[in-house]
Image (tube, rainbow, N blue to C red):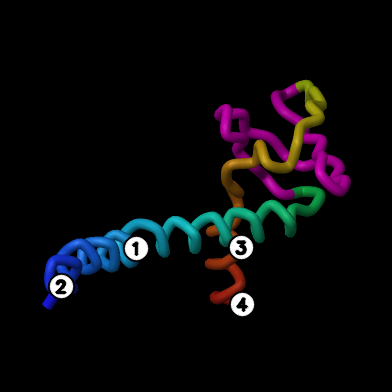
Amino acid sequence: MQFSGLIIPLGFLAIFYFLIIKPQKAKEKKIKLMRENLKVGDEVVTIGGIFGKVAKVKEDMITIEVGADKTKLTMAKWSVGNLVNENDEESSGKSE
């Protein structure tokens, strides 16, 4: 009977884990995989909002081309927030 007071807090912890922590870890894993699989020609958006095309990929650095004059910016891979052409590749792969 001493443990009856722990049932509600443990229930809240379980709900918190399945609604917040587990989905966040899955999202982080997906982003890490996307950053590891970057290749030349991918269109990306940085976490700072810069759109560009990957020109060079190194172990932990990438070089992207931005703007009409193709200015090259070198930055850390972790600064890539999203692939622009990820959904285009998936939809074109299904239709072929």
Q: Residues within 10 Å of mark 1 (few under 14, many from 20)?
A: few
**Residue type pointed to by label 1:** Tyr
Give the SS element for disc 3: helix
Residue under numbered circle 1: 17
Of the two numbered discs 2 and 3 in the rendering, the one whose residue sits closer to the viewer: 2
Mark 4 residue element: loop
Farthest front residue? 2
Amino acid at the residue labelled 3: Glu
Is residue 21 left or right of 81 when viewed as pictured?
left
Magenta part of the chain? 42-68
The residue under label 3 is: 89
Query: How many angstroms separate mark 4 from mark 3 (CA)?
Result: 11 Å
The answer to which of marks 4 and 1 sits earlier in the sequence is 1
Q: Residue drawn 11% across and 78% down? A: 1
Between disc 1 and disc 3, the foreground one is 1
Mark 1 vs mark 3, CA separation in Å = 33 Å
The residue mark sitting in front, 4 or 2, is 2
Q: What residue is shown with label 4?
A: 96
> Is residue 52 located in the magenta-colored stretch of the structure?
yes
Disc 4 from disc 2: Cα separation: 63 Å
Q: Measured from the top left, where is residue 16 in percent x and y?
A: 29, 59
Q: Position of residue 6 (x, y in %)?
A: 19, 67
Mark 4 or mark 2: whose residue is earlier in sequence: 2
Magenta portion: prevailing SS class: strand
Tag in front: 4 or 3: 3
Residue 14, above or below 47: below
